[in-house]
Image: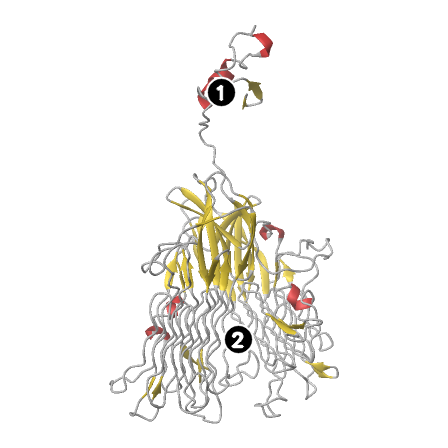
Amino acid sequence: MGYLGRRIGKSQNQGDSSPEAANGAVGGGILDLFSNGYFERQGNIYNAPGIIEAGVVATGGVISDYTDNGIVYRAHVFTSTGELDVTGTGTLGAQADFLVVGGGGAGGSDPGNNGAAGGGGAGGYRSTMPEGPGGPSPSAESQLTLTVQPYTITVGGGGAATSSPGVPGSPGNPSTFSTITSQGGGGGGAAYVSTAPFNGNGRPGGSGGGAGSQSTSSQTAGTGSRVVDPDGPAPTQGYPGGLGHNSSVGPNNMRSGGGGGAGAAGYNANPPASPSDANGAGGAGKASTISGTSTNYAGGGTASNDSDQVPISNNPGAPFGGGSSENVGGSRVGTAGKYATGGGGCGNGRDSDPSAAALGGTGGSGVVIVRYKIATTETQTAKATGGAISFYGGKTIHTFTGSGTFATAPNWSSATVEYVVVGGGGGGGLNEFGGGGGAGAYRTGTTPIGAHPVSTNIQVGGGGIGNRQIQNPLPAGYQGTASYFGTPITSPGGGGGGVDDSASPFPSSTPGEQGMPGGSGGGNALDTSGLPSGGPATGSPFPGTIGATPTSGWGHPGGKGSRSPIGGAGGGGAGGAGGAPATRVGGAGIQLPTTFRDPAQTIGAPGPTSAPTPNGFDTSGKYWVAGGGAGGGPAPTYSPTDGAASSGGGGYWSTPGSSTNPNQMIGAVQNTGSGGGSGAETVPGSFAGASGIVIVAYPT
């Protein structure tokens, strides 16, 4: 029986056009018979024009819908660990493309012996996409067939740098989707130390780490990884790192190799007899359009020392997320690989001060992207380009997890757009009792955009690195970078957490205890000098009800440290001030406005499920951003569901009953603008803040 426009009648080959048809077998009138016969011809072959076949139905990650050659794809972009929950496979086939990139390896460190350390290798790169240059080597992999089930997505974190003499950078962590695993990048080799177990060699990984300098001969570079594939050749995930050497020419004669990338090997240090005795650059990565926009991934980190840097302009790995060396406040710092690219960190050396070691850059976190077909005809057309584009609640939403451009399309008409802009979170303070990093300022409101063409620059601020102990011109963690939707609409980054100066190598006179200012201020460290307050905030206090913010955005100061109880204070959050050492939790975050709470997406961090409803929050436990980082302290006991951890901030918490691993790190959740945490009594250190986010919506 066919249905058309509120009339019900049998199809043409079943009905009778006579009003006296027996048993009510009338076709439903001439119009219904004609229409039904058009749509449902002999043999009941359904051929209704304009009907869109349904594709896979799934939730999770940041959604990007786009059309390519008449096919509408949906991509789920995961910049942090989560879940792809498939609830339907549709009629278009359930084959899925994927891109899985592991976390990048950290650059190696110099133990202060006039040496040079190798660059970190990029995270392993596996994909079904035949993208350039040349696609995943040797060829693109086969698609996976989705079934109705939840898929755990693991996004590997970047390897941590170390200043321990003779120890290479830590390898990155693997990323996984279903049966696909991409290995973390290999750590860069340390500057040579004869008693070290690695002797300056780069570590193996998805792409291998570059070798450190050697006092007698070339070092062995880390190798790119191959993973056994039972259905075909082993996919090559990356390339090896470059070699280092010791030259007999010049006062700073130790040179190291660059980290390998997904598209090319790391560069060897120039031969000792070369006129340009230089460290090796990082290997190039690969580009992919799986998200709907061509994006670069998995570049190797450069090698470096104080006297011989590899600048960004000379590093093939830099456009693909690999770290390069640069001057920061008069000191040469090995920068981190870019988050959500799997880029390797920059190796670093220090030849001007043999008494102090130098840290390389941490590896960039990885990424997982899954895409599938959802339709054969585009049903909704975006009126602008830029970011990940999705449709929800009658609005078109552009989500920027990295910098880009919001540009109107020819079908654009003047409109008032709604936005959320969150700056990058501040880095945590160093040592056992450092302060937590403050969150980036949170700003939301509306702004008019006139007739086409209009192009607006978008910057997504990076998280500030934690205090690096050496070669850090700041006494505390670094401030996060500002995010903006056009420079008039700017959210400053969060302030870095204060440093516990009671521990080596800081003298008691180091003025690093107070948290740094920012959108939300960093928390104070252990207070030995009676500091009156935590790091100040440029943001305005949250009034208690979600709505348009002042131009300064929302932000709060960091908490005040103390000696009794001992500990560092939490960084401020967009929703509240950082906690004192008694709790050490970071300040509360804020939930995104209702416009951006698409239940199919995972934007932001988990949060409270018992928030009061009159102030605009819901109880979903989702969509939270801009939480402060936790302060350090003895025997941490705060729960991962309290304070900062429930809004994206980082820190340590204790696992009750665990004797082998009593402390766990909760990293700041990427693209929330939350602050990084400080260390714990048993695990000293500091951790980077989270990158920010920019989201724009307008009527579809």
Q: Quadrant of the N terminus?
A: top right
Q: Position of residue 77 (x, y in %)?
A: 49, 56
Residue 430 quadrant: bottom right
- Asked if one can make out residue 486 in the rendered structure from this viewpoint, the answer is no
Packing grade of label 1 (10 A; few <14, some 14-19, many >=20) is many
Label 2 amino acid?
Answer: Ile
Q: Residue furthest front?
A: 230
Q: Residue 196 appears at what percent x and percent y?
A: 46, 87
| Residue under label 2 | 465
State the image quarter where residue 3 is shown: top right
Q: Which mark is residue 36?
A: 1
Residue 688 to residue 83: above or below: below
Is residue 560 positioned above or below 3 on the image?
below
Which residue occupies the extreme top position in the image? Answer: 20
Q: Position of residue 396 (x, y in %)?
A: 51, 47
Q: Which mark is residue 670?
A: none
From this view, report whether residue 70 is shown above or below residue 140: above
Q: Amino acid at mark 1?
A: Asn
Element marked by disc 1: helix
Seen at 55% across and 46% down, the residue is: 148
* Residue found at x 56% / y 71%: 689
Tag 2 secondary structure: loop
Q: Nearer the viewer, residue 376 or 683?
A: 683
Residue shown at the point (59%, 72%) measured from the top left: 676
Could one spot residue 510 in this view of the protein? yes
Say whether disc 1 or disc 2 marks the residue closer to the N-terminus: 1
Mark 2 crowdedness (10 Å alpha carbons): few <14, some 14-19, many ≥20: many
Q: At which x and y percent is residue 536? A: 63, 75
- Rounded to the nearest angstrom, the CA distance separating label 1 from label 2 is 66 Å
